Image: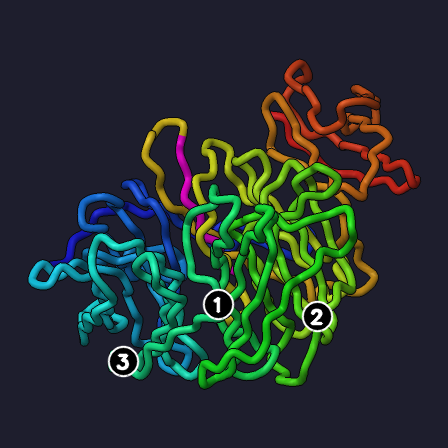
Amino acid sequence: MKTKLYTFITGLLMAACYTSYGQQIVSEFASTAPSYYCELVEASDGNFIIGSCIDLYNGRKYTVYKVSPEGNFLISADFNNVYDLLDFPSDPNIFLLSGYEIDDTDNTYHLALTFIDAELNTINEVSIPIGEFGNDFWDGNVFVTPNDEIIFPYSIGPNDVFHIMRIAKDGALLEDKAFPAIPRGTWDFTHAIAPVAFYSDINVTDKTPLTYHCLGFSKNKDGEAMLVNYVLDDHLNLVECIEYTPYDQNSTFEFDYNTFISTLGTNPALKPSYLSSSLNYNSAMLPAIVKYDTNNQPEAIRKFSSYATPGIMATKDENTIYFTLTYYGAFIFIIRLDGNFDVAWNFPLPNPTSSVNALNTVKVLRNGDIAIGVCLYSYSNEQPIFKFFIIRDNYDAIPETATVKRSFNLYPNPVKDQLSLIFTDDIEPESVELYDLSSRLVGTKRNGLESIDISSIPAGIYILHVTLKDGTSYYEKIMKE
């Protein structure tokens, strides 16, 4: 049964509206009905397939939409007991819905896999038994490998161990392998004595072809968090256990859902890894990316503001990392870095009326654009909605002589009352000055530079002059509403 439950707010935006330092929002679309999380994949015709959970508690109701690149609604279909929407690397016209169901006949958990085509028609359904219902059940994220195999990590029962199911593209179970050497998964962060494990990223990276990385946190006997990567080969043989060391002795890793590991580019040669997570650095919680050399030793680090929580890391090519940060639970910034952690640009997503419930998707599309999906709580609506931004990165087309880097962000612009300036920890601002278009100084501020009150000045266009303590200065055009 197909039905249209959402109305999409959409349109190609003029580049002048949201263009800054080489990137622009070329399309955005949002739902008007509740959505608790969302995923996006691409079909071969360039349209987007979007999955959205519309009810967390009554059968995990899930709606899948087909939407044009401009954000126009095309079709939708409803499903139950769905947690994830995934695509297959070799076939952009088949998509996978994964979830769980309880078999009442034998009281067991089942892994439910539904295969759909680009027109949202069901072409195959598979149910694979997992274990007895009511037992302690932990599941990691289902994902699809580069060779189109489906991987499902789990453990069930108080005495069980870590498992990985390997499933073919047609839904046939190829292997269900136990790993006694890997701590079993759990959602329990409170037990400070017995070693427990939470897996934040279980995937395949391109460090070597088809190498599985089970990246997670364990607790030692003292309750301290250890960030460990259990590496398996393409036959699911455990080949290495890496315990990551933070970049310096003043920092420790902290439990965080948004912990990712990746490498740059598709060259299969052994190369450095990039690990993004949260650090406790001198008693301050900081999001960070740490670069590890080929011997898994920390080589470099990029720390971000303590006002931010880490988001999702995605890599594009041999020298491009995209990383998202959420400030104050409201403003999301996407940052482009190179392999040496130099910032090419950072860009705030427009979000003037909502707070962020969850950042669900950061994905590099086939044409090089970046899709970012978030769930938002609107001030006028107590239930969250989803919103997607499609961002065009034009940085590589900018002449080398152009100035494209800026060491801070400001938001919102246009602004009504308070202008927020966000500086990274390695930036020390000296002063902020505001000029009108006749070059008359309107105001100066030297303290508390993170928030500028401009409520008393008339509407119009102004020039903001920001000076850093190292003598660097920037001029930005501000529109006062």
Q: For residue 369: magenta?
A: no
Q: Position of residue 50 (x, y in %)?
A: 34, 59
User: What residue appears at the point 67 percent right and 14 percent down from the top-left corner?
Assistant: 456
Q: The residue under label 3 is which amino acid type?
A: Leu
N-terminal of the two: label 3 or label 1?
3
Q: Position of residue 437 (x, y in %)?
A: 77, 29
Q: Is residue 15 visible?
A: no
Q: The residue under label 1 is which amino acid type?
A: Ile
On the image, numbered disc 2 is attached to which residue?
296
What is the tally of numbered marks visible in this picture?
3
Label 2 crowd bin: few (<14), some (14–19), many (20+), radius 10 Å: some
N-terminal of the two: label 2 or label 3?
3
Question: Which of the 4 quarters of the picture holds residue 124?
Answer: bottom left
Dot label at residue 173: 3
Whether the residues at callouts 2 and 1 have beta carbons within 8 Å, the answer is no
**Mark pair 3, 1: CA separation:** 22 Å
User: What residue appears at the point 26 percent right and 61 percent down from the top-left corner?
Assistant: 99
Secondary structure category for the residue under label 2: loop
The magenta-colored residue range is: 370-378
Secondary structure category for the residue under label 1: loop
Q: Quadrant of the C terminus?
A: top right
On the image, numbered disc 1 is attached to which residue?
182
Q: Position of residue 205 (x, y in %)?
A: 55, 74
**Mark pair 2, 3: CA separation:** 34 Å
User: What residue appears at the point 36 percent right and 69 percent down from the top-left corner?
Assistant: 152
